[in-house]
Image (cartoon, grey):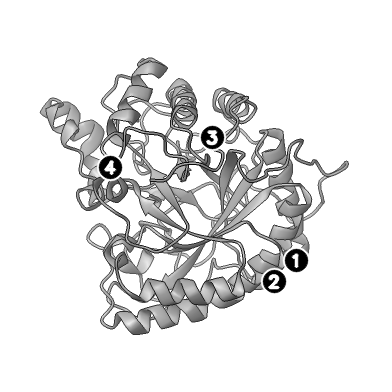
Amino acid sequence: MKNEKNAPHTKSAENARKKRSKVPLLAVLPVTVTSLVIGLPFVVGDHPLRWRAGSLAPALVLHGSPAKKGGGPDGTVLANGSGTAPQASGTAADAGAPTGPALKVDKPWKPGMPEWGVQIFWEDTKEHGDAYVEKQARVQADYLVGLKANAVSVSFPFYTEGRTSTKLAAGRGTPTPEHLDTVLRVFHEAGLRTTVRPTLDEAALIPPEGWRGNIKPTDKTAWFASYEALLGPYLDVAQRRQAATFVIGTELNSMEGHPGWKDLITQAEKRFKGEVSYDANWDNYVNGRIAVPVTRLGVDAYFPVKAADDASVDELVAGWNTWLDKKSKEALPRIVLSEAGISAMDGAYQAPGDFYTKRRVNPAVQANWYKAVCEVVRERKMAGVYWWSVSFGADPKAAPQEHDSRLNFAGRPDSEREIRACFGSDYPGPGTAGAH
């Protein structure tokens, strides 16, 4: 969810959550509560907020901010309109490398084991040299190992010129293949299972009407050709650095079902011998078949649950299962939660992908949600979960500040405790059986 995601991502906003989130159960809430707690996020987006590299300040990347002059593939303007990432508390300096020996995963992932992971959102800049990238990758690797993670997904933006454009390109924020090579190497050395996840930035799509899920390129054949050319160098790096998974698309609802996917995936599999996957938006997943011919499906999971802030973990689990039962009441061993998360604030259960609103900080809301989601993963025998998210440029050990996104879990002790408990559990994993 986060350009929208961005907005929900920045993972960001809950935008045409009409377009991405059909939530009839919310209609039963009193009008006042619905308007104040849910109305705004559903106007702006469906995904968690992502943060700009080098800053904890939320920026509309996935379901982003309106395009500004000078934006676009060759020099996309940041959400603050500046073109340079703002400095903020919690960011890591360029100087100095982590001290002490590099940490390594105790039990490296193997097929059949659960993927206990985190989404790293990375917006690279020309100001960040090779030394900075390697140092910061080490900072994040050490943090993930400390959380008992065995997997990491590296999400980064690419750009388009508008909702009907047929052109896709790297731009400000897109890491070079060489920098991606460095990051994957460091994560691999730490024993982490790696996923590469390019994600269409939404800044030029003019939210809330435009988001990555409703693009309408005038020539879809040309769009797929442009996409193939863009992805090629990153597929090569993923192959060279033995990444486990390459995500061929994220939340591209309007493009699902197009025959162009078949050739794109065929060409991708010639360059990358790992697993090619697709990450679907949660509402599309529960409401129908995701027509993208991949071997594995991820779900960006921001299921709204009608529950009070003091709801029990059992209530939250039941709320999740109500949504998943729309798809299947059985185990889901081939499904991985490619994104899961929630803001640490009052009222977040009803709109977990709300990344714009900042109500009173409530760490228990986030921690209990994490505990519940982990229980759902185990009960449904899912392939694993990736929490959204940690900014590549941030210091993950710094306590979140009042101006930071509530979605941030790094530096929140209660949430980190639940993540460690989840990742350190004795859940054997999905094995090799099942479908859905």
Could you tell whether 338 is left or right of 302 in the image? right
Q: CA distance from mark 1 to mark 4?
A: 38 Å
SS under mark 4: helix
Amino acid bearing label 4 = Pro
- Residue indicated by mark 3: 409
SS under mark 2: helix
Viewer-side label of 2, 4:
2
- Residue indicated by mark 2: 178
Q: CA distance from mark 2 to mark 1?
A: 9 Å
Q: Do the residues under discs 2 and 4 have CB atoms within 8 angstroms?
A: no
Q: Position of residue 190 (x, y in %)?
A: 76, 47
- Residue indicated by mark 1: 130
SS under mark 3: loop
Graded by Cα atoms within 10 Å as few (under 14), some (14 to 19) or many (20 or more), the crowding at tag 3 reads many
- Labels 1 and 4: the sequence-earlier one: 4
- Labels 2 and 1: the sequence-earlier one: 1
Q: CA distance from mark 2 to mark 4?
A: 37 Å
Graded by Cα atoms within 10 Å as few (under 14), some (14 to 19) or many (20 or more), the crowding at tag 4 reads many
Amino acid bearing label 2 = Glu
Say how many tags the image has.
Answer: 4
What residue is at 25 percent from the left and 57 percent from the top?
208
Q: Do the residues under discs 2 and 1 have CB atoms within 8 angstroms?
A: yes
- Residue indicated by mark 4: 41
Q: Quadrant of the C terminus?
A: top left
Graded by Cα atoms within 10 Å as few (under 14), some (14 to 19) or many (20 or more), the crowding at tag 2 reads few
